[in-house]
Image: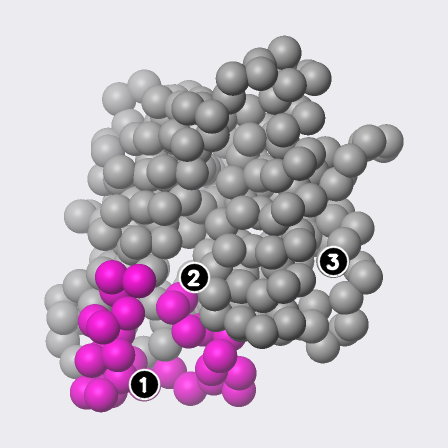
């Protein structure tokens, strides 16, 4: 399938951002198997999505790997909120406490979480600790429902969120790479608004979309001290071969 610029090529992977709303499963509980499945799904799906971006293929393999390790869980946060927003829009009377993760409908108030495999602390304490990074999820979901972004706008939001976050974590030459990515996609988004949408004045629309991303950034930055304190007291006993991959993910 032909696409005339990088943003539209990345948008060819939009099917990885979507979900089959007719094949959803409702889970009353979530344990180790479900957690690992969600992690694997998000990492692999984010990988498949970004391979539609030509600039990514120009990077050395080690840089590609590092970048993927940085962005997968940030991609997950917006994907979770986006799919939850779609689910609410297409299903009447949905409980606002429900979220969509992978193909599972999870109610944070009703669903039991098995934390025994990840911590020796009481379940209530661990659950509260794990949910700390999701403090603004409902704000993001409501904003996405109200804004109703197009596929192209959503693709840009996912890319901007991931590359901005990765650049701030990596710094140096790698930040120059992610800044370059954002510059390319910003130019493509400009063309989308001006040429495709015939909308020369799009600053307000773009600022509203970026407000959503900024809320997600805020949830990451504000939860950092909480998770750093958790590591001091060994709240989670999960061991990783590549711990840098899980920094800011809520699992580390």
Q: Does 19 sit left or right of 64 as displayed?
A: left
Mark nearer the viewer, 1 or 3: 3
* Residue 229 horizontal/vertical position (percent): 20, 80
* Residue 63 horizontal/vertical position (percent): 69, 72
Q: CA distance from mark 2 to mark 3?
A: 30 Å
Which residue is under mark 1? Answer: 237
* Residue 176 horizontal/vertical position (percent): 63, 63
Q: Residue 119: name its quadrant.
A: bottom left
Which residue is under mark 2? Answer: 34
Q: Give the quarter of the figure containing the C terminus.
A: bottom left
Mark nearer the viewer, 2 or 3: 3
* Secondary structure category for the residue under label 1: loop
**Among numbered discs 2 and 3, the one appearing first in the sequence:** 2
Q: Are marks 2 and 1 in contact (CB under 8 Å)?
A: no
Residue positioned 68% across, 17% down in the render: 196
Q: Is residue 127 visible?
A: no
**Category of crowding for the residue at label 2, using alpha-carbon neighbours closer than 10 angstroms: few (below 14), some (14–19), many (at least 20):** some
Residue 188 painted magenta? no
Q: Which residues are magenta?
A: 221-249
Q: Is residue 88 visible?
A: yes
Q: Is residue 208 above or below residue 54?
A: above
Residue positioned 25% across, 61% down in the render: 222
Q: CA distance from mark 1 to mark 3?
A: 34 Å
Q: Does 115 sit left or right of 77 as displayed?
A: left
Q: Nearer the viewer, residue 227 or 38?
A: 227
- Report how many numbered discs are placed on residues in the image: 3
Q: Is residue 30 above or below residue 28?
A: below
**Among numbered discs 2 and 1, the one appearing first in the sequence:** 2
Which residue is under mark 3? Answer: 56
């Amino acid at each position: 399938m032909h696409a005339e610029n990088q943003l539209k090529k990345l948008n060819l992977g939009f099917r990885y951002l979507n979900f089959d709303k007719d094949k959803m499963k409702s889970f009353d509980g979530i344990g180790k198997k479900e957690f690992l499945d969600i992690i694997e799904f998000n990492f692999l799906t984010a990988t498949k999505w970004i391979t539609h971006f030509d600039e990514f293929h120009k990077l050395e393999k080690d840089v590609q790997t590092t970048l993927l390790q940085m962005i997968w869980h940030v991609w997950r946060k917006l994907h979770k909120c986006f799919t939850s927003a779609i689910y609410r829009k297409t299903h009447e009377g949905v409980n606002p406490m429900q979220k969509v993760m992978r193909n599972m409908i999870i109610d944070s108030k009703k669903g039991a979480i098995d934390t025994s495999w990840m911590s020796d602390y009481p379940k209530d304490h661990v659950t509260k600790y794990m949910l700390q990074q999701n403090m603004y999820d409902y704000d993001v979901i409501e904003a996405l429902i109200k804004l109703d972004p197009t596929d192209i706008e959503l693709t840009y939001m996912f890319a901007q969120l991931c590359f901005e976050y990765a650049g701030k974590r990596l710094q140096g030459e790698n930040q120059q790479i992610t800044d370059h990515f954002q510059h390319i996609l910003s130019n493509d988004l400009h063309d989308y608004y001006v040429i495709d949408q015939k909308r020369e004045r799009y600053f307000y629309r773009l600022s509203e979309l970026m407000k959503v991303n900024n809320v997600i950034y805020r949830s990451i930055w504000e939860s950092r001290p909480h998770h750093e304190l958790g590591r001091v007291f060994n709240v989670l006993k999960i061991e990783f071969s590549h711990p840098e991959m899980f920094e800011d993910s809520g699992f580390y």
